Amino acid sequence: MRISSICALGFMLSLPLSVHAQDLPNTAPSDSAHTKVFTLAGAPKQAGSMDGNGPAARFKRPMGIAVGPDGMIYVADTENHTIRRITPAGAVTTLAGAAGSKGSLDGSGEAARFYHPVGIALDSQGNLYVTDSENHTIRKISPAGVVTTLAGAAGRKGSSDGVGTKASFNYPHGITVSADGTIYVTDTENHSVRQISNTSTVTTLAGVSGKKGTADGKGATALFYHPSGIAVTADGILYVADNGNHTIRKISRNGAVTTLAGTARKNGHADGIGPSARFDWPNGVAVDSQGLVYVADNVNSIIRIITPTGIVTTLVGKALSWGSQDGNTESARFEFPFGVAVNPSGNTIYVTDTKNQTIRRIQRSLL
């Protein structure tokens, strides 16, 4: 499974000292006393595929996650090769695919097949979009549960732009949908960001296929290194977790790529402003209606918040202190979280706690 390069499980480098949120000017509101972490579904370190309520359900390396306006949560259950649906109360069902049965078949519900799905996103019509990573395709799931292949051809990796199956991808991971229906994909092994129009036309928005790097710029002058998570604001600004560079990149509406936070190739866990902040293989990103960016900082096993001006703070967890405990900002623990999703107000955040095999909920009482 070609995901080890972006998960970096067990991979450690020396880390700089961190700074604290209270030392930073104009940061996101500090609400540690009013932030709680709960386990919504699954049981720590108990892998499996069972549907069920809360701790009775099982997952196997869940990665991508999305939340709908009705509060329903959708998860790419990667090593089960399935898409799961979770109610706000924690009842888990399998929406599409069959656990343990990988493939590329289109179809309804259990008849469809996936091969290590990673990213998942929802559009305004209730359609789900999935990066089917080892099939090198983008799949669509209708509200009725019918799975079709939107772009790419199963088993054929590449970097070609084109319409539908004429296009090709190379282990796509992150996916997001803008207000106008444009789909954006991080084409991870191609080190690029692709876009898919309403006519299923795939083009390369930024980066150069097969060329990794750190450069800011526009279009082919910008370079990435294993981009992973991606999120879009209501007004069309993109944020990308540039996993191999340990940075968070921003793509403006005119396609210009800049580095919002972190410094390329310098990993760590420091809070700070812009280039002074540090991440360690960041993966999932999400953005709320206020423009706050949420990051699943994978190896650090913490969830970060970034303001639109690049101020980075740690929301929950303690860097490099792994575990599965629920609790408040200081006591909660994660173990290699991958995906993150947030409701528009930013008061509820969902996380795929990948190595713990659980789905976590972060509840914030915004004052």
Image (cartoon, grey):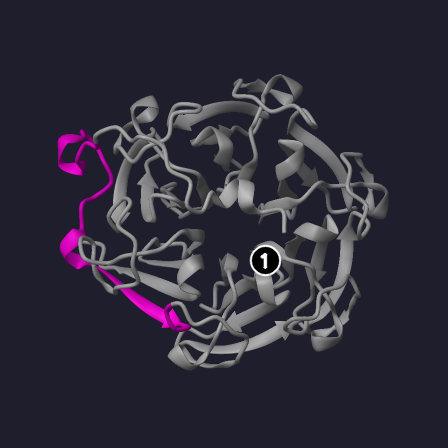
Residue lying farthest to the right in this orientation? 166
- Considering depth in this image, is 271 or 123 the residue closer to the camera? 271
Label 1 SS: loop
Task: Give the residues in magenta.
Answer: 18-44
Is 26 placed above or below 52 here? Answer: above
Q: Is residue 26 magenta?
A: yes
In the figure, residue 18 lies in which quadrant? top left
* 192 drawn magenta: no
User: Residue 242, can we see it?
Assistant: no
Does residue 254 sit above or below 318 in this rendering?
above
Q: Quadrant of residue 102?
A: bottom right
**Near-viewer residue (355 or 248):** 355
* Left-right relation of 359 to 366: right
Which one is nearer the viewer's eye here, 59 or 308? 59
The reply to whether residue 219 is in sight is yes
Q: Assess disc 1: are there few (<14), some (14-19) or many (≥20) residues with their C-alpha within 10 Å of its C-alpha.
A: few
- Horizontal side of 282 relative to 322 (left or right) equals right
* Residue 106, percent from left and from top: 79, 66
Q: Which residue does the image show at 40% across and 51% down from the upper left?
A: 336
Identify whether 72 is placed above or below 233: below
Q: How many marks?
A: 1
Q: Position of residue 89 (x, y in %)?
A: 39, 77
Residue found 26% across the figure and 32% down from its top: 270
The picture places residue 92, in percent across and down from the top left corner, at 49, 77
Instruction: Look at mark 1 in the image and give the residue it sits on.
Output: 124
User: Residue at 60% across / 24% down in the picture?
Assistant: 212
Q: Is residue 175 above or below residue 223?
A: below
Identity, as a three-letter code, of the amino acid under mark 1: Ser
Residue 335 in percent (x, y) is at 36, 55
